[in-house]
Image (spheres, helix red, strand yellow):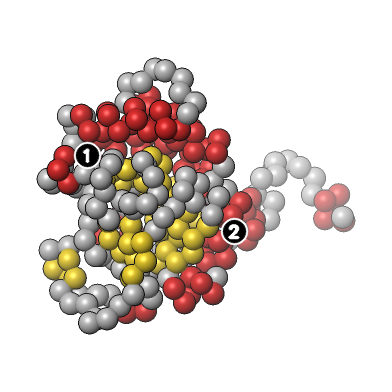
């Protein structure tokens, strides 16, 4: 947690089990109209790569269809509840957690020569520019990639301490004269969780790459940001919230679920 406060991010190695990674990839291959049962990761990538490069639909629509399948299978919930990930999220945000399920939270990056108007290729930016609350966090993990050497994301170290950076046309209008950057080299199953204030950008890729991004917030923390206009799915309750849900109303009144004809005398004596 000290790393998150100082650097604006936490990298978690081997956070997602191979079983879940395979489920993610197989779900995508189904969308790629591939009916073969492929076990080798390299072969799965080749099928995904060929389809994404030749896909005629927009990159946004391509990702939206895949993400909807993830939601239907509750795969996002599984990922966020993975032991290492859940531990970091709850240490930062508490246990009343939800994720943004409205947008197609997948980022497809294609080689520039294959996609002149790459929808998901982004310059330096902060997630708060898109309406995220400073009290929320973003998760990023690769799903399909040729390797982990090129084509992920790049961060500006400690930029979360700059506050809201002035911007125009989805680009910062000014940056400090000196700053330190870090390029990610995450393997399948690795995850980075970072502040919505942290400045980051896409790195040019030579091969197709697909990553999952998720905004997570504590749904009990009130804010007036654009996040209120999105749909959120709850995947974790704190112990206090579990009690409130059990009692069923905000007055927390007793005997709510008992039959009116029940004799309370025995209960009251216990």
Q: Secondary structure at mark 1?
A: helix
Tag on residue 172?
none
Q: Is residue 47 above or below residue 249?
A: above
Q: Measured from the top left, where is residue 36 in percent x and y?
A: 42, 18
Give residue 238's quadrant in the image.
bottom right
Give residue 88's quadrant in the image.
bottom right
Depth check: give the residue in front, 63 or 73: 63
Label 2 packing within 10 angstroms: few (<14), some (14-19), many (20+): some
Q: Residue at x 48, y 75 (%)?
A: 5
* Quadrant into which the C terminus falls: bottom right
Q: Secondary structure at mark 2?
A: helix
- In this image, 270 relative to 26: left or right? right
Q: Are marks 2 and 1 in contact (CB under 8 Å)?
A: no
Q: Which label's residue is closer to the chain start, 2 or 1?
A: 1
Depth check: give the residue in front, 24 or 94: 24
Depth check: give the residue in front, 20 or 111: 111
The reply to whether residue 225 is visible in this rendering is no
* Quadrant into which the N terminus falls: bottom right
Residue under circle 1? 59
Q: Measured from the top left, where is residue 157 in percent x and y?
A: 37, 73
How many angstroms separate mark 2 from mark 1 (CA)? Answer: 33 Å
Q: Residue at x 45, y 60 (%)?
A: 193
Q: Residue at x 59, y 59 (%)?
A: 87
Residue under circle 2? 87
Give residue 199's quadrant in the image.
bottom left
Q: Residue at x 41, y 42 (%)?
A: 143
Q: Is residue 82 above or below residue 162?
A: above
Label 1 packing within 10 angstroms: few (<14), some (14-19), many (20+): many
């Amino acid at each position: 947690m000290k790393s998150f406060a100082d650097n604006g991010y936490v990298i978690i190695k081997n956070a997602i089990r191979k079983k879940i990674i395979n489920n993610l990839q197989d779900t995508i291959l189904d969308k790629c109209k591939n009916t073969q049962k492929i076990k080798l990761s390299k072969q799965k990538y080749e099928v995904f790569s060929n389809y994404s490069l030749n896909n005629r639909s927009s990159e946004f629509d391509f990702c939206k269809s895949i993400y909807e399948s993830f939601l239907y299978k509750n795969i996002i919930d599984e990922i966020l509840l993975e032991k290492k990930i859940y531990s970091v999220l709850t240490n930062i945000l508490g246990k009343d957690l939800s994720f943004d399920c409205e947008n197609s939270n997948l980022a497809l990056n294609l080689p520039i020569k294959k996609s002149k108007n790459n929808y998901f290729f982004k310059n330096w930016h902060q997630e708060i520019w898109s309406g995220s609350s400073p009290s929320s966090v973003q998760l990023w993990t690769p799903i399909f990639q040729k390797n982990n050497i090129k084509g992920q994301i790049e961060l500006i170290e400690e930029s979360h301490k700059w506050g809201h950076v002035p911007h125009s046309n989805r680009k910062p209008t000014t940056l400090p004269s000196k700053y330190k950057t870090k390029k990610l080299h995450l393997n399948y199953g690795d995850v980075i969780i970072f502040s919505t204030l942290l400045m980051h950008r896409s790195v040019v890729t030579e091969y197709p790459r697909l990553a999952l991004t998720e905004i997570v917030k504590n749904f009990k923390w009130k804010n007036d940001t654009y996040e209120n206009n999105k749909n959120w799915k709850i995947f974790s309750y704190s112990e206090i919230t579990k009690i409130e849900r059990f009692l069923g109303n905000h007055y927390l009144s007793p005997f709510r679920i008992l039959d009116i004809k029940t004799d309370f005398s025995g209960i009251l004596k216990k």
